[in-house]
Amino acid sequence: MTADISRTNRKSTPGAIRTRHGRPVHHWRRDLVELAALFTAVAVADAVANLIGHGPDGPALLLISALALAATAGFHTWWARRHVHAPPTGDTSDTGARPSASAHPAGPSAQGGPGALWRMRTTVRDEPGSLAALCTALATHRVDILSLQTHPLADGTVDEFLLRAPDALAASELTRVIAESGGSSTWIERADAHDLVDAPTRVLSLATRTALDAAELPLALRQLLGRCTIRSLPAGTRGEPVPAEGVLEDTVLRLRAPGGGVLSVERPYLPFTPTEFARARALVELDSRLGPRIPRAHDVLTLPEGNAITVRRVDTGDLDAARAMHERCSDRTLDLRYHGPVRDADRYLNHLLSPRFGRTLAAQTASGRMVGLGHLLWDGEETEVALLVEDDWQRRGVGTELLERLVRMAVEAGCASVYAVTRSANTGMVAAMRGLGLPLDYQVEEGTLVITARLDPARTGAPSRRDDEQLRL
């Protein structure tokens, strides 16, 4: 298309010279016209010479002609300098044109330079001009609108913006500007570069992650809906059963969980829109159709004493191997892990190994014998880590290897901290948490010790928050 436009512009330009193979193309009719003009000029010159040479006023006529030619040449020079031969300002072929400074005020946000990124949502009246008034108010304060999504409601429209504002413009000032221009129920928070991805691309990326790993569903919903609490509840625990299409109740979404029961999503600070509800329902339906699945990647590690173990993701398909490891563990080891009757330990395994509730890593010997389990469990807005290592393999580095990988997974999932529930007598778990090199908080609750580690992506070597790449071991 660019070449066609260029050819059109060249043809429409007055005085353009056609070329062929890089050389001017002359037509025979032009040559005849030039030859006729030459003969006419010779005839006129001969007539003027006869008039001057044979007339009584010949010298006077010659002087007058010379003055007339000089005056004509001077006038032509003055006219050419005053009127520059340039294309008109409306010429669309002038690709080098730039808007004037008055049309686009200078500034960081106006020129796409540094500035603060904000995600903002506000409700406006469903009337012509209401959105225009809001955008005009933002432009007055040199705020760039990088993206805009509209969510129609019964009594108005929720507009969601991604903004780049000058660093000096505070959130409270932005909220005031929106309120004065007709916005209400305004919510605003800081954004980062990941928010620059448009909504369809983000949803497709989250769907891909969910398709690869069933444990990604809670994380995908959290990234899709923002800060929210996600719980998996047994069927019949809250009022009427959830219909197949789900339920939208202001700040609560309830959907049928893929493995049965109810998936509850709560966000008390901001009501859900029908668009968000439809996207969340589509992700849950995708997860339900694909069934249980986990990545099959694995790592082969060499322990300090020289033994090789394999660390890989496991799920409910490895339930028999996990039960066999339970049978080889002592009552004391199971008691320190589950804080309850030893005979009930096997009942927890089906829940712990389900990717619906988190991720589980297993350590296996070269023969395939399971000797350790590590769990990363989604607990609402918090994340729990738990370890169980067979007695004969304790204090050989197995628990440390599992815990370090679980913490990296938590960082990749965007978790700010992880906690472990244990007892002060479980010196192995306490030592493993200390070995992470992260800030730790200790709290005693009803005879148990809760150790919370605040995560630092730089120190754990994990990718930053909201990384859309597939999570690996």
Image: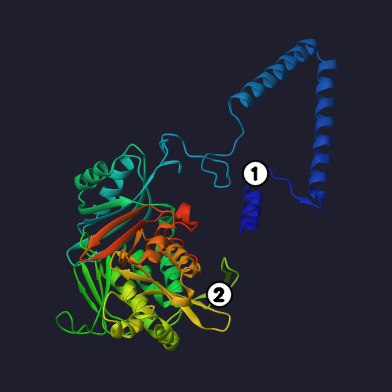
Q: How many residues crowd around disc 2 within 10 Å: few (fewer than 14), some, or many (20 or more)?
A: many
Disc 1 element:
loop
Residue designated by label 1: 14
Q: Which residue is located at x 81 percent, y 31 percent?
A: 41
Q: Which residue is located at x 80 percent, y 28 percent?
A: 44
- Residue 309: mark in rendering: 2
Disc 2 element:
strand
- Residue 452: mark in rendering: none
Quadrant occupied by the N terminus: bottom right
Residue 179 picture location, percent across and down: 20, 47
Report if residue 145 is visible in the image. Answer: yes
Task: Report the side of 238 relative to 408 (left or right).
Answer: left
Task: Report the side of 346 relative to 39 (left or right).
Answer: left
Residue 4 picture location, percent across and down: 64, 58
As measured in the structure, the alpha-carbon distance from the residue carrying label 1 to the one carrying label 2 is 80 Å
Residue type at tag 2: Ile
Report if residue 26 is visible in the image. Answer: no
User: Toward the viewer: 99 or 114?
Assistant: 114
